[in-house]
Image (cartoon, rainbow, N blue to C red):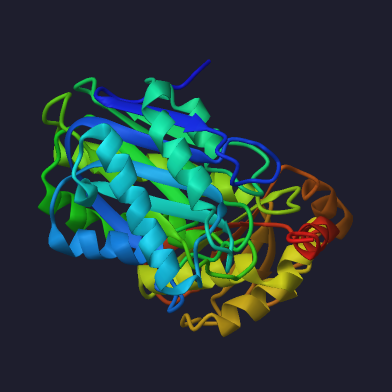
Amino acid sequence: MSLTFPLGFTAAAMAAGIKPSGKTDLSGVTSASNCTWAFAGTRSTTAAACVTRNRELYAGGQPVRALLVNAGNANAATGRRGAADNADMADAFGSVLNVPARGVLTASTGIIGHLLPMDRVLSGIEHLPDELTEGADAFASAIMTTDTRPKTAQATLSTGARIVGTAKGSGMIHPDMATMFAFAFTDAAVEQEALRAAFPPIVNRTFNAVTVDGDTSTNDMALVLANGQAGEVPLEEFLTALEGVMRDLAQQIAADGEGATKLLTVQVSGARTEAEALAAARTCCVSPLLKSAVHGNDPNWGRVIMAVGRSGAAVDVGRLTVSVQGQPVFAGGPLPYDAAQVSASMKAEEVRFVIDLGVGKASGEAWGCDLSADYVRINAEYTT
């Protein structure tokens, strides 16, 4: 069943010749009215031109009307030329939509250090408005790079307003403020101040709780755009639904990690603070040793103890507990268990570790994936 955008949003996607494969690689979303919006971008000190420009627009506080995305080229580490090309993309898309350039956000993803083929990009932008529809599926596919499948999620509120989210990400996933790409669009009316205040904690509990390989991208960003065409909604209900959409997308990214065969979920409770719970969970998810054990169905809980111990979270080892796939394996010390039975239970699409740090009441959850030989193959062959 095809996915449609909320009221007032339309999108277009096309193959502009950025990707050598010939797949769709240029896409855009536009709103019939101005949007309030919230943004989170990578804190990498080598951030791409799109992140830098979006951050400047965010500080300005003005509404936006459109988002332009290219895949296959990150336009990162491309100097002044890359910044100028990014600005030209926004200007060109704004011109064909009759929208000010400062009302157009940009996002680029792909290989770092290559200049954009601007003749193809600008030619494609000219034709994008001809392809605008209410369908979201083509847009979700056009933003992919090494992803094996599109990532979408949606929610409908009690008022009938909707939230539709799309994301891309498979490798170079260890976000710091955001994730590879995550875009949410809603026809709910939400005040910009309230949206911006609530967005960072939501990002922290969702996209910042995802890791595939421990590498933070130069192009990471998350956005939510609200055009208000479906009217006002209860703020608490909206924020709960938005976090649910973002959480769904985050889990899809983890499950589609490069070379992944399993989703790795780590739940941590008994922490002093939510930040420490998330740190412990995320450290477990990024550990190459634990990820390898998950791939091999090895219930080696010692690797959990190791990861928690280096996470920076406070732990009372005498009260620390660990379970694998529902089987308790540690409670202040080793517990007897049937290793063969637990190993068999790990031959599943999702492997879950539950940990209690024994020092408080805060909790958090993170998601990752197993580490397979395919991860090495994919990245060894990425540019060659």
Residue 276 appears in the figure? yes
Q: Residue 340, how many percent across, how many down?
A: 88, 55
Identify the image quadrant of residue 296: bottom right
Marks counted in the figure total 0
**Along the horizontal axis of the image, is 276 left or right of 370?**
left
**In this view of the protein, which residue sits in the foreground, 220 or 164?**
220
Taking 299 as reference, is 145 left or right?
A: left
Rendering coords of residue 238 (x, y %): 23, 38
Left or right: 326 as drawn, with respect to 89: right
128 w.r.t. 346: above or below = above
Q: Quadrant of the C terminus?
A: bottom right
Can you give x and y, in whole percent of width and height, for residue 108 in the image? Answer: 47, 54
Residue that sits furthest to the top in the current view: 1
> Would you say residue 177 is visible in this rendering?
no
Q: Would residue 62 be found to the left or right of residue 266 on screen? A: left
- Residue lying furthest right in this view? 340
Q: Who's the residue at 13% across and 49% down the image?
A: 192
* Viewer-side residue, 346 vs 318: 346
Find residue 185 and report its horizontal and vertical position in percent.
Answer: 31, 36
Residue in view at x 18 percent, y 45 percent: 100
The residue positioned 57% from the left and 72% from the top of the image is 283
Nearer to the camera, 210 or 183:
183
For image coordinates 72% across by 68% down, the residue present is: 290
In the image, residue 86 above or below residue 272? above
